[in-house]
Image (cartoon, rainbow, N blue to C red):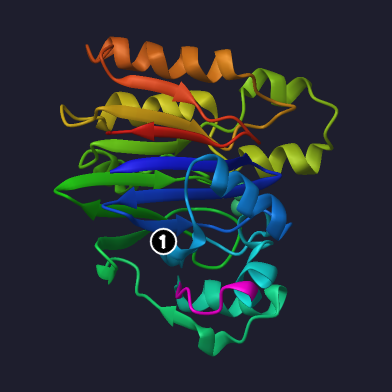
Amino acid sequence: MKFHSLASSSAGNAYLVESAGSVLMIDCGIAARSEMLARMGSVGISPDSIVGIVFTHDHSDHAKGLGVFHRKFPDIPLFANLMTSEAIASSAGVPEEEFIPFENGQSFEVGPFEVCAFPIPHDVPDPVGFMVRAEGIGYFHATDVGTPLDSIGVHLAEADYATLEANHDRGLLAGSDRSEMLKRRIRGPRGHLSNDEAADLVRRFASRRLKALRLAHLSCECNAPHLADAAVRDALREIAREDVDLAVLPPYEPVTWGAA
Ligand SMILES: [Zn+2]
Ligand SMILES: [Zn+2]
């Protein structure tokens, strides 16, 4: 399996998982279709290879590209749980019947991928993270996580490759000029994962299987790549896993990582 991040921040999120020529898209949060296609092209992916798009939740930074993308590529199947598809259908102007609903906790197949959604705490109806399996490899994907719950960690423990949110540094968030209300929302139990909370999940749940970890959805204002990296690197050191390939995903540039 190979992974591509096309966008990773509160301005937009779109991730690709590639296996044997088939590609699964996780979230479709790049508004301009030309930009989406350009970024895909720059990592060598053609839209023809996309076997499905799965959605974590309905926030616009994860779904705002769907309307225009779906009109251009109506044959690419869309997957979301019921609450998420209801919300995205109305915001993206895509009929709800176009979505293939899945149940959290029940595996479903998308091309060569076996996908299973698990609930995460975030301030929308029924948000999820995903475990994706193909080629005997497990990929964990969780952004927009309010609380580092054990029920999320157990999936991380099964991962060979993982993308995990490290949204903010607590000190930078506290000192930022954001409103008190927004600060409360971000650090609240249904907001976003801080660097320390991401490190905590990694410390408690990363297993011997984990080969590579990418930190995602960093706040441009309230975080810095070196802070997120340092927090999680410390956690890996504590569990004697300095060998894990760790890096931060950039907010706008497409990047490829994972197995050859
Ligand atoms: Zn988000
Ligand atoms: Zn969100």
| Residue 6: x %, y % from top left | 56, 43
Q: Main secondary structure of the magenta part?
A: loop
**Secondary element at tag 1:** helix
To which quarter of the image does residue 3 belong?
top left
Identified at 53% across, 57% down, the residue is 27
Q: Nearer the viewer, residue 109 or 228?
A: 109
Placement of 172 over or under 59, stated as above or below = above
The answer to whether 143 appears left or right of 187 in the picture is left
Placement of 155 over or under 113, stated as above or below = above
Q: Nearer the viewer, residue 246 or 84?
A: 246
Placement of 256 over or under 128, stated as above or below = above
Q: Residue furthest bottom?
A: 97
| Residue 161: x %, y % from top left | 30, 36
Is residue 89 something one can see in this rendering?
A: yes
Placement of 222 over or under 9, stated as above or below = above
Q: How many marks?
A: 1
The answer to whether 66 appears left or right of 201 in the picture is right
Q: Which residue is mark 1?
A: 49
To which quarter of the image does residue 63 belong?
bottom right
| Residue 22: x %, y % from top left | 33, 58
Is residue 106 something one can see in this rendering?
A: no
- Mark 1 residue type: Ser
To which quarter of the image does residue 245 belong?
top left
The magenta segment: 72-78
Identified at 70% across, 20% down, the residue is 172
Crowding near pointer 1: few (<14 within 10 Å), some, many (20+)? few
Question: Residue 48 colored magenta?
Answer: no
